[in-house]
Amino acid sequence: KALNDLAFLLDLQGNYDQAKQLHERALRIRQENLGLDHPDVAESLNNLAQSLRYQGKYDEAKPLCERAIEISEKTLGPNH
């Protein structure tokens, strides 16, 4: 959680490269500790995608969003 919070702060400050590194680190930690299909992994994917959207990197953000949706629907149901 703290990594994500710091990454969001860096995003808001325009420090996108540093923010991306922290979002990616948080994602790796969650994947390693929780598994690839955990809802918190979906949250981290979405956070990284949001950071990329701030930078206008929509083509990079889209597959992350799609994967986050896939995980959420699989674990929490399609109407969550």
Image: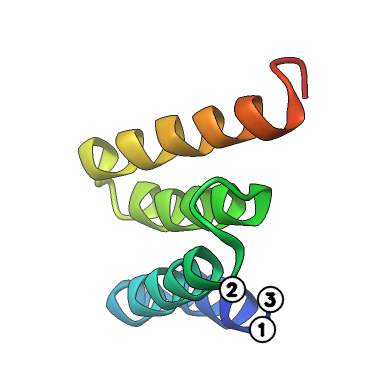
Rate crowding at label 2 as few (under 14), some (14 to 19) or many (20 or more) other CA atoms within 10 Å: many
Give the residue at the far top of this rendering: 79
Residue 48 relative to residue 40: left or right:
left
Residue 24 relative to residue 38: left or right:
left
Tell me the CA gap for discs 3 and 1: 4 Å
Residue occupied by mark 1: 2
Task: Determine the image quadrant of residue 62.
Answer: top left
Q: Nearer the viewer, residue 35 or 9?
A: 35
- Residue 10 at x, y percent in the picture: 48, 79
Q: Nearer the viewer, residue 27 or 12?
A: 27
Q: Nearer the viewer, residue 6 or 13?
A: 6
Q: Amino acid at mark 2?
A: Asn
Residue 70 higher or lower than 1, as above or below: above
Asked whether disc 3 touches disc 1, contact meaning CB atoms under 8 Å apart, the reply is yes
- Residue 60 at x, y percent in the picture: 24, 44
The quarter of the image holding the C terminus is top right
Q: Amino acid at mark 1?
A: Ala
Asked whether disc 3 touches disc 2, contact meaning CB atoms under 8 Å apart, the reply is yes
Residue at 35 percent of width and 70 percent of height: 20
Residue 1's disc is: 3
Q: Amino acid at mark 3?
A: Lys
Tell me the CA gap for discs 1 and 2: 5 Å
Asked whether disc 1 touches disc 2, contact meaning CB atoms under 8 Å apart, the reply is yes
Task: Determine the image quadrant of residue 33.
Answer: bottom right
Residue occupied by mark 2: 4
Secondary element at image label 3? loop
Secondary element at image label 2? helix
Secondary element at image label 1? helix
Rate crowding at label 3 as few (under 14), some (14 to 19) or many (20 or more) other CA atoms within 10 Å: few
The quarter of the image holding the N terminus is bottom right
